[in-house]
């Protein structure tokens, strides 16, 4: 009996450390996944440089808000060089630490199409665009979309750099294979039917379907909104794994009071 008990304890410890090692190794491999995404040839027929892919029937309710006079293509047929935009400092930078997200993307998002699925005021959308990404900023509220459009124009971004798109609540608003990376910030627990929602998200992402989720850790926080819902990290990882992702990892020490989860499909050998 004593031998069986010791064997059980040893087995549980071995499983714990194996899982920890796997999560650590995956965090090291994540930059390679994003590099693969950036150079993976488009097999969906979408034009990644201009994102002129027709919406599939499931995204027929999606509309985009274009700023007056915005230009998405050069009349000669070649894209215009995107203007460089400097983002003003924000008190939120101290705890949101957008540089951490960029570092997890290997500080190289140039020409990646990133879907900011709950863009809100555009905090991450504009910073990702300033780093060279092409951002699809999803909004479900028309007034927020208008406010973000005004902020985009005031900062000097083009619609080519930051496309602000209206989509009904509960729908990510992406055509099949349209984006390279998806980002969900402080909104995961507000999604009603998460299984259906992330099925549509996966459909809208090109292989290997990288997903980043930033959300509040359980416990009190001086910066989280009053009444903000929380989810335990293990529960979050289990749920995301249930959406079809096999490679899931998380950091709880990169951004104060927040967890950063990252997930992809396995890379082809």
Image (tube, rainbow, N blue to C red):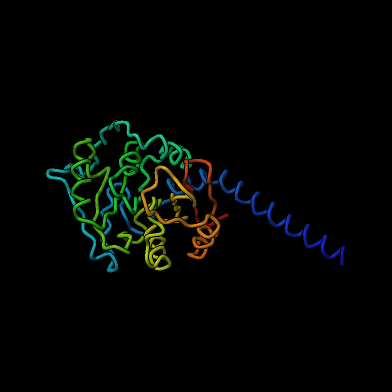
| Residue at x-position 18% and y-position 43% | 150
Q: Residue at x 76, y 59 (%)?
A: 11
Judging depth in this view, the residue of 79 and 178 nearest the camera is 178
Q: Horizontal and vertical percent for residue 188? A: 41, 57
Is residue 252 shown left or right of residue 46? right
- State whether residue 94 is above or below residue 193: above
Q: Residue at x 26, y 63 (%)?
A: 168
Q: Quadrant of residue 193?
A: bottom left
Q: Where's residue 246, x and y in %?
A: 55, 60
Name the side, left or right, on which 183 lies relative to 70: right
Q: Is residue 202 above or below residue 254?
A: below
Instruction: Report the residue at 47% width, 44% height from top.
Output: 257
Closest to the observer: 181 or 238?
238
Q: Residue 13 falls in which quadrant of the image?
A: bottom right
Numbered marks: total = 0
Q: Quadrant of the N terminus?
A: bottom right
The percent coordinates of residue 159 (x first, y second) are 22, 44
Image quarter in which the C terminus is found? bottom right
Q: Position of residue 152 (x, y in %)?
A: 22, 41
């Amino acid at each position: 009996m004593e031998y069986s008990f010791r064997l059980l304890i040893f087995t549980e410890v071995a499983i714990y450390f194996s899982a920890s090692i796997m999560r650590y190794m995956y965090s090291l491999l994540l930059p390679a996944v994003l590099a693969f995404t950036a150079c993976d040839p488009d097999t969906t027929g979408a034009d990644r440089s201009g994102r002129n892919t027709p919406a599939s029937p499931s995204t027929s309710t999606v509309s985009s808000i274009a700023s007056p006079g915005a230009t998405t293509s050069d009349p000669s047929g070649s894209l215009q060089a995107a203007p460089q935009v400097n983002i003003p400092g924000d008190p939120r930078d101290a705890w949101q630490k957008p540089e951490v997200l960029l570092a997890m993307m290997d500080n190289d998002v140039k020409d990646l199409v990133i879907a900011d699925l709950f863009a809100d005021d555009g905090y991450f959308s504009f910073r990702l665009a300033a780093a060279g990404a092409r951002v699809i900023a999803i909004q479900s509220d028309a007034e927020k979309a208008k406010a973000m459009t005004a902020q985009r124009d005031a900062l000097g971004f083009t619609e080519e750099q930051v496309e602000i798109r209206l989509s009904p609540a509960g729908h990510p608003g992406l055509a099949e294979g349209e984006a390279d990376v998806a980002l969900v910030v402080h909104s995961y627990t507000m999604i009603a039917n998460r299984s259906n929602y992330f099925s549509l998200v996966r459909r809208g992402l090109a292989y290997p379907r990288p997903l980043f989720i930033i959300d509040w850790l359980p416990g009190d926080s001086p910066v989280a909104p009053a009444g903000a819902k929380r989810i335990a990290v293990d529960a979050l990882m289990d749920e995301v794994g249930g959406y079809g992702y096999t490679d899931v990892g998380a950091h709880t020490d990169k951004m104060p009071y927040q967890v950063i989860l990252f997930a992809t499909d396995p890379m082809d050998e």
